[in-house]
Amino acid sequence: NIIITGANSGLGLALVKALNIDNNILAFVNQDKSNIIDIDGGEINIINWDFRDIDSNKINKNKIIKFKPNIIINSAASFGSEKEKFSEIDIKQFNSVFNINVLSALSIIQNSLIGNDLEQIVNISSEMGSINLNKHGGYYYYRTSKTLLNSITKNLSIDLKHKNIIVYCIHPGSIKTKLNSGGLISPEVSAQKIINLCAENNFKFSGKFLDINKNVLEW
């Protein structure tokens, strides 16, 4: 049983298509679910949830608990406004991006932990969230949200070690999506490499920030 967020486009959609053959999927989409309703394979349970509104998760809590997820792949993301200069930061939009990129994932993880079936938590991050690799500045909404996601992931890996739950971040590469039209690889290639990492079920990954080729990145 696998939870996938951001499932209606890009990497999330590619993950659903690749994993749906042999797994049960609980797919979180923002509004448009037309891309996934006709996918062949196993059963796909679709939940419409606007991640900008975290409070709406109260409605979905029981669905998550009943699903009994074994793996969570949090891939929903928003880049935020193209206006990324410090002087142009909008606090309301900052909150919106943080809800989508960080707090929605945290909420889903909290509800998934109510059961005892969870084995892996995979948070799709970005090398832009690395503090040590930041040489160019800018992109406050996206960078800082991914940095916070990385920090939460590291913390969770420590707190959930006694439950034998593997928790790690993955930089999915420069994917050609609506967030990144100049991407270098397809969502399908990245998705398959992420699936390969999950299939290893390797506790050595826990608490790490990896790329899709298993290289450890700096926080």
Image: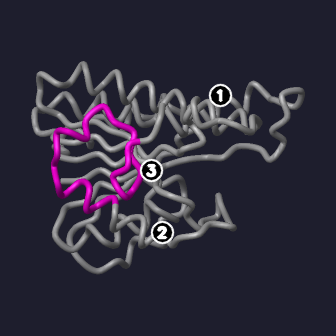
Residue 44 against residue 125 in the figure, above or below: below
Q: Give the residue type that dot 2 points to.
A: Pro
- Could you tell me if the residues under marks 1 and 3 are in contact, i.e. CB atoms within 8 Å? no
The residue located at (28%, 40%) in the rendering is: 121
Disc 1 crowd rating (10 Å Cα; few below 14, some 14-19, many 20+) is: some
- Picture quarter containing residue 72? top left
Percent across and percent down for residue 63 are 26, 43
- Could you tell me if the residues under marks 1 and 2 are in contact, i.e. CB atoms within 8 Å? no
Disc number for residue 75: 3
Q: Is residue 211 left or right of residue 179?
A: left
**Earlier residue among tags 3 and 2:** 3
Percent across and percent down for residue 150 are 45, 31
Question: What residue does disc 1 label?
Answer: 95
Question: What residue does disc 2 label?
Answer: 187
Report helix, strand or loop for mark 3.
loop
Q: Give the residue type that dot 1 points to.
A: Asn
Extreme right residue here? 87
User: Quick one: 1 or 135, which is closer to the camera?
Assistant: 135
Percent across and percent down for residue 118 are 16, 39
The residue located at (18%, 58%) in the rendering is: 199
- Disc 3 from disc 2: Cα separation: 12 Å
The residue located at (47%, 35%) in the rendering is: 218
Residue interval drawn in magenta? 194-216
**Earlier residue among tags 1 and 3:** 3
